[in-house]
């Protein structure tokens, strides 16, 4: 079985489906993305990209709302990556790491102490705290809750 993600004109995933092996294979039985994508396009129209349930290519399994970034080359055989856009939407200070194909925070998240873990604390990122920080370099943004 193969998984395919439909992407809209903004390269946002709108749905993910499972496609049978026979609908993705060439005459020799080898799975080919273009064959599976053509099968999906014939049934549903739209634009389809293969995604990997075990994240073996394109960095991660596509989810609804994820973005397909075609310019991220994740391997010699497969180009593009599915990116969770949530951090970039809410946290404009984060930047794309083109190796991991994930957004990264400008400040390393602090490590919880044993006492903090026992108390059930965690850290959350607050973009407005980072934006208001006047330190150079900035040191605030992670807040203990």
Image (spheres, rainbow, N blue to C red):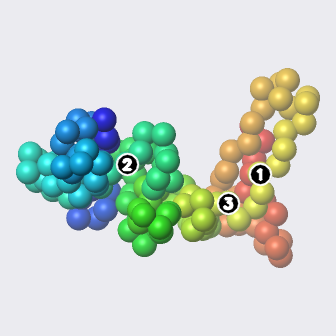
Tell which residue pokes out farthest to the left in this image: 42
Q: Is residue 48 visible in the rendered structure shown here?
A: no
Task: Please tell me which of labels 2 and 3 falls first in the chain.
Answer: 2
Residue at the image position 49 percent from the left and 45 percent from the top: 55
Q: Nearer the viewer, residue 27 or 39?
A: 27
Query: Please, what secondary structure does the residue beneath circle 2 have?
Result: strand
Cβ–Cβ under 8 Å for marks 2 and 1: no
Query: Please, what secondary structure does the residue beneath circle 1 have?
Result: loop
Question: Distance of mark 1 from mark 3, alpha carbons?
Answer: 8 Å
Q: Residues within 10 Å of mark 3 (few under 14, many from 20)?
A: some
Q: Residues within 10 Å of mark 1 (few under 14, many from 20)?
A: few
Tell me the number on the disc at residue 27. Answer: none
Question: Distance of mark 2 from mark 3, alpha carbons?
Answer: 26 Å
* Label 2 vs label 1, nearer the camera: 2
* Label 2 vs label 3, nearer the camera: 2
Cβ–Cβ under 8 Å for marks 1 and 3: yes
Cβ–Cβ under 8 Å for marks 2 and 3: no
How far across and how far down the image is residue 84, in percent?
47, 52
Quarter the C terminus occupies: top right
Residue that mark 3 sits on: 105
Residue that mark 1 sits on: 109
Residue that mark 2 sits on: 51
Quarter the N terminus occupies: top left
Q: Nearer the viewer, residue 140 or 72?
A: 72
Residue at the image position 75 percent from the left and 36 percent from the top: 122
Task: Please tell me which of labels 2 and 1 falls first in the chain.
Answer: 2
């Amino acid at each position: 079985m193969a998984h395919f993600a439909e992407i809209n004109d903004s390269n946002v995933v709108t749905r993910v489906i499972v496609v049978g092996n026979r609908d993705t294979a060439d005459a020799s039985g080898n799975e080919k993305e273009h064959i599976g994508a053509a099968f999906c396009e014939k049934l549903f129209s739209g634009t389809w990209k293969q995604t990997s349930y075990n994240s073996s290519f394109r960095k991660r399994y596509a989810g609804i709302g994820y973005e397909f970034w075609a310019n991220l080359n994740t391997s010699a055989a497969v180009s593009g990556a599915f990116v969770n856009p949530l951090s970039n939407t809410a946290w404009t200070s984060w930047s794309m790491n083109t190796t991991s194909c994930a957004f990264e925070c400008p400040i390393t998240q602090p490590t919880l102490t044993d006492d903090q873990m026992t108390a059930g604390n965690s850290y959350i990122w607050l973009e407005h705290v980072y934006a208001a920080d006047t330190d150079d370099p900035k040191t605030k943004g992670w807040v203990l809750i």
